[in-house]
Image (spheres, rainbow, N blue to C red):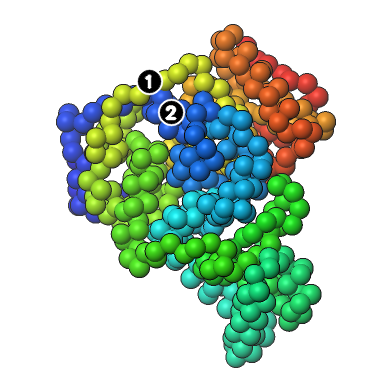
Amino acid sequence: MLGGDRGGFGCLEVGTVSSQRRMTNAERRARLVVRHHLGGTAGDVLDAVRCVAAMHSSDPVTPYLGVRARLRGFAVSGLEHALYEDRSLLRIHAMRRTLFVVPSTEAPLIHAAAGREDAARERRRLEGWVAAELGAKDGKALLTRAEAALLELLGDGRERGTREIIAALPELGTPIIVGSGTWATRVPLVSRLVLVLGMERRIVRGRPAGSWRSSQYRWAVAAQWVDEAPKWPDPAAARVELARRYLATHGPATLADLRWWAGWTARHAAAAIASLRAVPVQLEDGGDAFVLPGDDAPVELPRPTVAFLPGLDSTPMGWKERSWFLGEHGPLVYDRNGNAGPTVWVDGRIVGAWSQDSAGEVVYRLLEDVGSEAAESIAAEAASLTHWLGGDVVATRFPSPLERELAGTSRTSRRS
């Protein structure tokens, strides 16, 4: 039993091993397949996003390819409609300062639980950079003028990109040095100001400046873009609700998993687990993890279930400890910083990686024998994804070693 301050988790009680339900890796993978809709079983775009609690969007193609993997018959226009027309989804900075696509109604909760403190830190950094450039008094005055002018400009209801903003408000093109040492770079003030105001949820990312693959967005006033849901004044209560959503989609998960995914301190993670009265289970490796009360029933796995997930997808990025679905393939399909590249999945485990050649054909490599039935399904899915992409070549922001190798390949390589 964990007690005292062991591991920094306070006095959280997780029960004794003998009283815990044991959950094998195979059971965990079955839950992953069913709950993350890796068989293409999502009911709609919103369901595909909610099934992973929040969908990564640092790489602009990730949510499109992620929804496509989970929703049969999905077209790019389906996510565009949810983001820009009915606005049931939003892009916001949240857990770990990462950009996610989330349901609009849940954005205030997620911001209070995991984004508000990061936004405050980012504002302090910007204030420091501007002060270093112009002096404390002049820097503060410039920021005050810049914020007011930008919000007034966007207040007419028209979305604008940073170039349009600078054209209308030249002062926002004032260059400042951000970062330090070898990471220092000079950028226009507006590029950091929109980031801070976006993290504070005063403005939002609207339509991209280019295609669905573009990472340059137009900006709009948040209150005009989407109806504001009730705010969460109590961050502790918000953390409990976010932990509930995480365990509902990712449980069983360890305290370390929750802490890493949410970007919380150990104390915050433990407090949320305790408030939920989460039920401890014993993992196959002997470690302790948690599920929500009543959520330990067996899950039947449909076989074979094949999925091609994009780089930084929320499933391979959903847990800190990944061996139960990753095996020994980590050095090939994740980069050195733990960012997942595009992966091939069979029955809830990573079995290979995929990329595209210069002509846009999906190419892949399997890292283990998956059997003839699964191999045929993988080949069919690669052909289907090639057709869906229609010649568009998607770039991955953090390519894995195996993806880099595959990117120049002109034909599929299989290892049996």
| Left/right of residue 353 with respect to residue 109 in the rendered view | right
Pointer 1: residues within 10 angstroms few (<14), some, or many (20+)? few
Pointer 2: residues within 10 angstroms few (<14), some, or many (20+)? many
Residue identifier under label 1: 300
Q: Residue at x 53, y 62 (%)?
A: 226
**In the rendered image, which quarter is residue 135 located in?**
bottom right
**Given the current orientation, which residue lies at the most extreme right position?**
359
Amino acid type at mark 1: Glu
Image location of residue 392, percent across then percent down: 77, 37
Amino acid type at mark 2: Val
**In the rendered image, which quarter is residue 386 located in?**
top right
Q: Residue at x 21, y 31 (%)?
A: 20
> Do labels 2 and 1 touch, CB within 8 Å?
yes
**Disc number placed over residue 34 in the picture, else none:** 2
Image location of residue 18, percent across then percent down: 17, 29
Residue 191 visible in the displayed image: no
Q: Residue at x 48, y 26 (%)?
A: 348
**Given the current orientation, which residue lies at the most extreme front position?**
86
Pick whichever of labels 2 and 1 is earlier in the sequence: 2
Quarter that holds the C terminus? top right
Residue 259 visible in the displayed image: yes
Residue closer to the observer: 242 or 412: 242
Image location of residue 19, percent across then percent down: 16, 31
Residue closer to the observer: 243 or 217: 217
Image location of residue 107, percent across then percent down: 46, 57
Give the secondary structure at mark 2.
Answer: helix
Q: CA distance from mark 2 to mark 1?
A: 8 Å
Give the answer, above or below, for where 279 lies relative to 174.
above
